[in-house]
Amino acid sequence: MKGHIIFLLGLQLFAGAAGRAQSRAVVPAAGAGRPNIIFILSDDHAYQAIGAYGSRLTATPNIDRIAREGALFTRAMVTNSICGPSRATLLTGKYSHKNGYTLNEKKFNTSQPVFPMLMRGNGYQTAWIGKWHLGNLPRGFDYFRILNGQGEYYNPDLIDSRDTTRMTGYVTDIITKLTEDWLAARDTTKPFMLVVGEKATHREWLPDIQDLGAYDGRDLPLPPTFHDDYAGRKAAADQDMTIAKTMRLREDLKVHADYEHSGIYNRFTPEQKKAFYNYYENTVSREFDARKDSGEALLRWKYQRYLKDYLSVARSLDRNIGQLLDYLDRSGLSKNTIVVYTSDQGFFLGEHGWFDKRWIYEESLRTPFVMRWPGVIKAGSTVPAMMLNIDWAPTMLDIAGIPAPADMQGVSFLPLVDGRRGARSTAAAAAGWRKAMYYHYYEFPQPHHVYPHFGIRTERWVLARFYGPGNFWELYDLEKDPHEVKNLYGDPAYAGKIAELKQQLKRLIQQYDDQEALKLLD
């Protein structure tokens, strides 16, 4: 089918590289009690929309349950805040410039070693179910059932190693059903590593029918920077991702949606289309017509509609996570199964007047990350260490007792949470953990005209170098300016701090061997 390409080249190269990495691993005997792993990866789910992170917008009791029974990471961050590249980093433990996947809608090179292949070669069953979004078919898995590209919220096409089939229903429910079916049919003599790739909460935010109007009785609060004027910030002023101008009434907010000709709604069953029409045409669109808003009133109305649809999609996501946790309890798998919940990156929920992600700024850079491992991770733990998505792959390997390949750029964060090592050991690990991170974003000009940039983030400072249509720097003091609205670069009072941060940035660029960025330093 269109957009569905099967790659047959490079298998011998991949097997050879994976085999070399595996030859260094000590394979535990079958039945040695190694834990199972379920890694739930959602799409664009902001930490601001999760109860465990103090959300003012919504409740997420099931994601919160993972945090309550395990650990909540308060500084989990990504290295390139965009969907496909984040998934490539999960698989490889490498920055985008090293794994070759810097932009969305390309084809990920599956001939390189990925951590599921290493786990598979060391006695684990491996599977990926749901959103994959890497332009080709997975390798390194015993089983996969993936969405076609971005996937559809209703009646999605699912691809496996043999065929593509359309399944009737809501995508989050379908992914949960496929996950439970695979768990029930797996080889119970082996531990498993399963990635559950959720489509939610990606644009265009089509809620499950049972969640339509779930937030209609509420007036959601505006973030403090909603009316940001972008003063002193050229890139922020020149983007195309505002709720005011970029967000579309018909396609995004479903005002007088085209139910007859749109490819989205052509997939719907008559019952699904009727439910959407009754809600969005007879309620939302009628309200819009009656209000006749313009200017500030229209902007606020669009914000409310955006957030209410977004949170309604997230409501189904949280409900399905609860269903999966209940399945693990019923099946007896909970005690020896690690559960991770995270998103591919953060997301703007009206901060700076925006939606989407991409920037080195906090709401985009920081992603939710909660993890439960009964008997190992102390319930109710909070981890403030700066943990990155390059660390996810080496940590999963560490958990399984498999050495990470030498070219993985992340490090295992297991010492930060492993209660078996004692409080003194975890405290020492935290004390020696990174105090600064490196970030690099590439995609320009489409779809949102965010200038490419790289930079350093420390506990207090953000220094970013923008390039492409303009070459300039930005500096933020997070202690005095947590919302990142006052660019301090060029202020003589900060010349010493800028020089210090540039040296730190250069060391990080050299450490991660980003030659493109190194050439742009000044």
Image: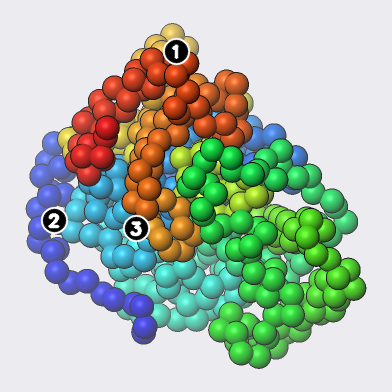
Question: How far apart are the alpha carbons under marks 2 and 3?
Answer: 26 Å
Mark 2, residue position: 15
**Horizontal arrangement in the rendering, residue 234 relative to residue 5 (left or right):** right
Question: What kind of element bears circle 1?
Answer: helix
Badge 1: residue crowd in 10 Å (few <14, some 14–19, many ≥20): some
Give residue 522's quadrant in the image. Answer: top left
Q: Which residue is mark 1?
A: 427
In the rendered view, how is the structure colored?
A: rainbow
* Residue located 71% across and 42% down the image: 223
Q: Say which amino acid is labelled 3.
A: Leu
Q: Which residue is mark 3?
A: 103
Quarter assignment of residue 62: top right
**Residue at left offset 53%, top offset 47%:** 236
Q: Is residue 5 above or below residue 30?
A: below
- Residue extending farthest to the bottom is 260
**Local crowd size for mark 3, using a 10 Å CA cut-off: few (<14), some (14–19), many (≥20):** some
Cα distance, mark 1 to mark 3? Answer: 37 Å
Q: Position of residue 226 (x, y in %)?
A: 69, 45
Q: Is residue 234 left or right of residue 520?
A: right
Residue 510 is situated, as x and y percent measured from the top left of the image, at 21, 31
Q: Position of residue 96 (x, y in %)?
A: 30, 48
Whole-number angstrom distance, CA of label 2 to CA of label 1 = 39 Å
Is 482 in front, or is 107?
482
Badge 2 or badge 3: first in the primary sequence? 2
* Residue 392 appears in the figure: no
Q: Amino acid at mark 1?
A: Ala
